[in-house]
Amino acid sequence: MSDKVVTLSEAVALVQPGDTIALGGMTLYRRPVAFVRELIRSGVKGLTLLALTAGYESDLLVGAGSVKRVRTCYFGLEVFGLAPMFTKKARDLEIVEETEVSLALGLRATLSGIGFQPARAWQGTDLLKVRPDVKTITCPYTGEQYVAFPAIKPDVAVIHVQESDHQGTAILKGNLALDREMALAAQRAIITTERLVEEVEGEIAIFGPRVDAVVLAPKGAYPTSCYPYYRLAGQEILDYVDACSGGDFEEYLAQFLDGKRGG
Amino acid sequence: MESVEVRLGAADHFTIDELIVTCISRQAKNGDLMAQGIATPLVVAGYILAKLTHAPDLIFGVATGGCITNSWAPLSISRAEEANLEKPLYIFGFDEVAGTLMFTLQPKEFFRPAQVDPRGNFNNVVLGDYYAPKLRLPGCGGIADVTNYSSHVYLYVPRHSRAVFVERLDFVSGVGVLEEERRGELSILSPGPRYLVTNLGTFDFEGGRMRLLSYHPGVSVERIQKKTGFPLAMAPDLHETPPPSAEEVRLLREEIDPLGIRELERLSGGRRRAKLREIIEREAEGF
């Protein structure tokens, strides 16, 4: 088996301008922060950001101007409040409304090789008005109306994991989000990992043969958490919120890119 | 502590946060599966209060950590994840949540809307015009999904105002009580929100119109109507909201939420950030 271990900058080179990039983890938990730092440094623009929920790392990407389109069902900092740069730039971004179902079933459609997955969702809401690409269908068996959620095809998925081997066979502990599905559905899958091992111990969540690159990135999710290694660093998230509300995002970003902030 | 202090007799007193938590707690029945979204400390406190009082067999489906658990720990910002994952009954991903568990298990869940209309439709997406918003909100998570089929949708609003309760929503992302004429065209199973608690009273949407069930101690019906942007219906047995018991207040302050994380939901701006910093610092000190 070939060794897929590369450096962060080699992994970032797998991301092309305009790609749809799926970020793993959940709000402030196990987010690929180290990867995002290198991605911003690379200067890649025009990305479509895909995430079940988008948090600190996504707000930095949006603030840095790397993102033109956002697809997520929640973009915020949980108890720390609104995501400041997303909120500020919302009018300039193309926001594709999503929900848990549209994201989960959109990926499932891709993984099943079909154009859509139906669900009981979205009817009676304004989501269908602002997503004219999403159609309804009539169930051939019950005659009921369902919404047909179109397949979602990420170009790249980036998942931060607790433990991976050199081929990308990896385990996840908690906050599974849509990580397994993103890694399988993407054209290119990148794993960043707290620990690089010869053989993983625990229940395997990431299918290694579909992984393209593995990067050793200890504390690679900080200041978001990586259970059980480190907790959510609330102080740092608060510092970020305070910097943004004081108009100092650029200064924070410069420090973040220098590695003086967020890890 | 919150400055809004409601006196009840000589010895007994409680804050409005504690009353909201108690109202949430009373909606949980023993054996229920209660879903916890993100950033909802009043709700988490309410569920735990129910478990420690009338509903010991309560089960929690938690977004933070991504699991189902029947254990609990005091409210915490930095430790919630590890507490939830300590002894899970089940670990889930969101493919399973969205495609299987939410419909099959039908958990009860309290949502916090930014706007609510008279029929109980609600909005968590945007304030103002969708394409030129006054304020973009985080998004609706799975609300537009579950409100198509769930019989267990509950709402809470920590700051009742005419900005929240509006005749017409800026955006519908949660479905309320459907008009009869729309039932035929839409395959919606949900009857709409079952219950709503705010800092002023409790409500339901019986008959497709927001209806006052009870007013909180010290709050007049006139004030509630004045703070609501449309006429309210009144329940025939309209009454004062029963206050928390002394034991419920003790549990909340001493066992469930000694750091006062629940208060964050009613604070905003600089006061909120200061409270957050205080909580984070105390947690870092190992509290």
Image (spheres, coloured by chain):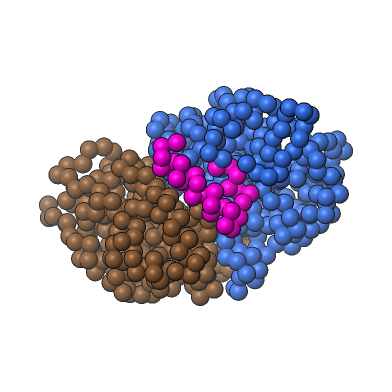
Q: Position of residue B283 (x, y in %)?
A: 44, 41
Q: Residue at x 71, y 33 (%)?
A: B13
- Answer with left or right where residue A250 lies relative to residue B190: left
Q: From the viewer's side, name the closer residue of B263 and B117.
A: B263
Provide the residue span drawn in magenta: B261-287
- Answer with left or right where residue A69 lies relative to residue B26: left
Q: From the viewer's side, name the closer residue of B282 and A181.
A: B282
Q: Quadrant of the C terminus of chain B?
A: top left
Regarding residue B268, the answer to whether it shows in the image is: yes
Q: Residue at x 52, y 69 (%)?
A: A88
Q: From the viewer's side, name the closer residue of A51 and A121.
A: A51
Q: Colour of chain A?
A: brown
Q: Position of residue A24 (x, y in %)?
A: 36, 54
Vertical relation: A236 (above or below) A19: above
Q: Position of residue B161 (x, y in %)?
A: 74, 55
Regarding residue A109, the answer to whether it shows in the image is: no
The chain coloured blue in the image: B
Q: Residue at x 59, y 73 (%)?
A: B131
Q: Position of residue B219 (x, y in %)?
A: 81, 43
- Answer with left or right where residue B228 lies relative to residue A26: right
Snapshot quadrant of residue B42? top right
- Answer with left or right where residue B285 lies relative to residue B32: left
Q: Residue at x 36, y 53 (%)?
A: A223
Judge whether residue B286 is colored magenta: yes
Q: Quadrant of the N terminus of chain B?
A: top right
Q: How many marks?
A: 0
Judge whether residue B88 is colored magenta: no
Task: Look at the magenta stretch and give its main secondary structure.
Answer: helix
